[in-house]
Image (spheres, coloured by chain):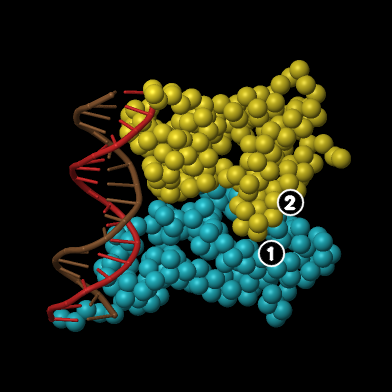
Chain colours: A cyan, B yellow, C brown, D red
Amino acid sequence: MRPQKVLDNDIYSALTKVFRAKGFEGASLNEIADATGLKKASLYHRFPEGKKQMAEAVFNYIDEWVEIKIFGALINNTLTPDQRLNQSINNIKELYNDGEESCIFRTLSMKVGLELFGSRIKNGMEQWIHHFMELGLAFGQSKEEAKSNAVQNLIDIQGSLIVSEGLKDLSIFENTLRIIKNRYSKE
Amino acid sequence: MRPQKVLDNDIYSALTKVFRAKGFEGASLNEIADATGLKKASLYHRFPEGKKQMAEAVFNYIDEWVEIKIFGALINNTLTPDQRLNQSINNIKELYNDGEESCIFRTLSMKVGLELFGSRIKNGMEQWIHHFMELGLAFGQSKEEAKSNAVQNLIDIQGSLIVSEGLKDLSIFENTLRIIKNRYSKE
DNA sequence: GTCTATAACGGGATAGAC
DNA sequence: GTCTATCCCGTTATAGAC
């Protein structure tokens, strides 16, 4: 029996799970092989440049998701500002699985990860800030207000993920999403 | 010539640097050996239980520093609340080297680290919250206010370290410390 | 496109001399 | 207390069959 071709999306999804949990150095090819259902040699067929390329695929995969589901919502001008806010917050919640899953900004930015992917991470963070700014402007905030709120949103998300995980209390992440909402729309 | 005994404190300091930068899995014994100036076998003389014990020494080393320089300042009732605030903020700045150094809550709490050190991390975070709460109470805040400010301080510190590093902009960390100050003392 | 098998290397850890 | 030398295993990566 011929081996099935494993679907690209299933591979990306499995890669993402592993790298988010373990980071770049902590993710071993054996574990990645188990998670994807491919043997190591097959992984090298898909990713000839090896582990680094696998991690890059994770960035691409998440970037695309975020672009559509979060940035897309934040700047969708067929929606009211309140709708944009609610939709993007819900999708942020989904991205981090209610606070259970880490962010690649964190797990892939330890020393080695930062050397390899520093510019992607910087770029990604700037995108988050840019799109949150648009939301603030849509709510009538000044440029300065919108900017500082956007930066603080990013800080809050990153920080609350770490604190939630450390304290094993997901309500902290949830509460942070509420705080972000309140920066734009009271009650 | 007899080998010098390498000072405990120099070892802890070097260990801390490596684990903070690389995390548990990313820190290799070769690198630790280089950083401490001890050969691998000598490290095992000091830390018979191996790498895990080395990381534990880092927790102890930082815990002690934080206990004295940060928690000590936060609850020092020979100082005015404003003095406690300023001193502890300055020491937080020092702890993270103006935002250049990571926090072990972050680097030692990836999947494997969390399995090994989860309860130490939880405990440590609770200590930070507890002592920040005392500061809030000293400033006349209600228990609820003091608690939520304390949690938010922790979130802000963790988040701003990640965002500062990612954007390569230490002013974000500095600004966060100012925000924390303003939770207690206006201007 | 996937596999088995294996190479080449670095990882954590230990033995034993000084 | 530190060292050199070594062990064993898991790691990344490759060769070649199917």
| Picture coordinates of residue A112, whole percent (x, y) | 49, 55
Question: Residue at image x 59%, y 49%?
Answer: A160
Residue type at mark 2? Ser
Considering every residue shown, the one lying at the far front of the view is: B1
Check residue A129 in the rendering and tell me which mark sits there, or answer none. 1
Q: Quadrant of residue A18?
A: bottom left
Residue A117 visible somewhere in the drawing: yes
How far is the residue under mark 2 from the one under mark 1? 16 Å
Please state which of residues A81 and B56 is positioned toward the viewer in this rendering.
B56
User: Which residue is denoted by mark 2 in the rendering?
Assistant: B171
Q: Chain of mark 1?
A: A
Residue type at mark 1? Ile
Please state which of residues B9 and B182 is positioned toward the viewer in this rendering.
B9
Up-down: is A78 above or below A125?
Answer: below
Considering every residue shown, the one lying at the far top of the view is: B78
| Picture coordinates of residue B50, whole percent (x, y) | 35, 35
Residue A179 visible somewhere in the drawing: no
Question: Residue at image x 65%, y 41%?
Answer: B97
> Quadrant where the C terminus of chain A lies?
bottom right
Q: Quadrant of residue B179?
A: top right
Question: Residue at image x 43%, y 66%?
Answer: A52
Up-down: is A59 above or below B13?
Answer: below
| Picture coordinates of residue B91, whole percent (x, y) | 69, 33
Q: Closer to us: mark 2 or mark 1? A: 2
Horizontal side of residue B184 vs B15, given as left or right: right
Q: Residues within 10 Å of mark 2 (few under 14, many from 20)?
A: few
